[in-house]
Amino acid sequence: MKRHHLLAVLLVTILATSCSTTNFTEYRGQGVVEGKGGTVRVVEGIDFWENGEPDRKYRILGVIDDSRGDGLISRLGKDGAIAKVARERGGDAVILSGSSRELRGVDLDSGAAYHRRITKLVVVKYVP
């Protein structure tokens, strides 16, 4: 009986922490921004600016809202999924604009808490 209970808790944990969504919302506006620089890493051909902004001129295309469980399984492939959406929307880079963690529930038997990580990124296109 205990074994079935443990299996059920494990299954609920995996399901609660593995669901993810990566949504793009178009930005409408004019103007070109010239950034001052920051830290950058490249994922699948897309620049990820996390502390600062691109060190060149760019135009904002939109915003990606990525929401996923806080567990290891759901974090796998996160950057690749973000890069794919940015590339599909014509972006050259994303700029991290915010990240938060929200409580989604608590297993009363084990006391385990389930969280979601919400990340907001600005998708940009470099301009000459």
Image: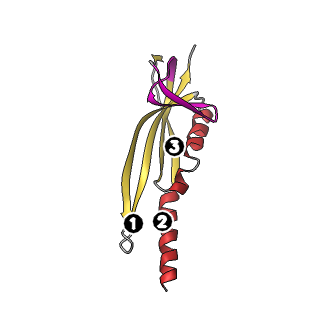
Q: Amino acid at mark 3?
A: Asn
Residue 112 marker: 1
Q: At which x and y percent is residue 27? A: 47, 30
Look at the image and give the residue range highlighted in magenta. 37-59
Q: Which residue is mark 2?
A: 13
In this rendering, does residue 101 appear at all? yes
Q: Is residue 70 magenta?
A: no
Distance CA(mark 1)–CA(mark 3): 28 Å
Foreground residue among 79 and 58: 79
Q: At which x and y percent is residue 118? A: 43, 46
Distance CA(mark 3)–CA(mark 2): 24 Å
Magenta residues: mostly which secondary structure?
A: strand
Q: Would you say 58 lies left or right of 98 here?
A: right
Is disc 1 placed on a helix, strand or loop?
A: loop
Q: Which residue is mark 3?
A: 23
Q: Quadrant of residue 41?
A: top right
- The number of discs equals 3
Foreground residue among 127 and 43: 43
Which numbered disc, 2 or 1, marks the residue that appears first in the sequence?
2
Q: Amino acid at mark 2?
A: Thr
Q: Is residue 58 magenta?
A: yes
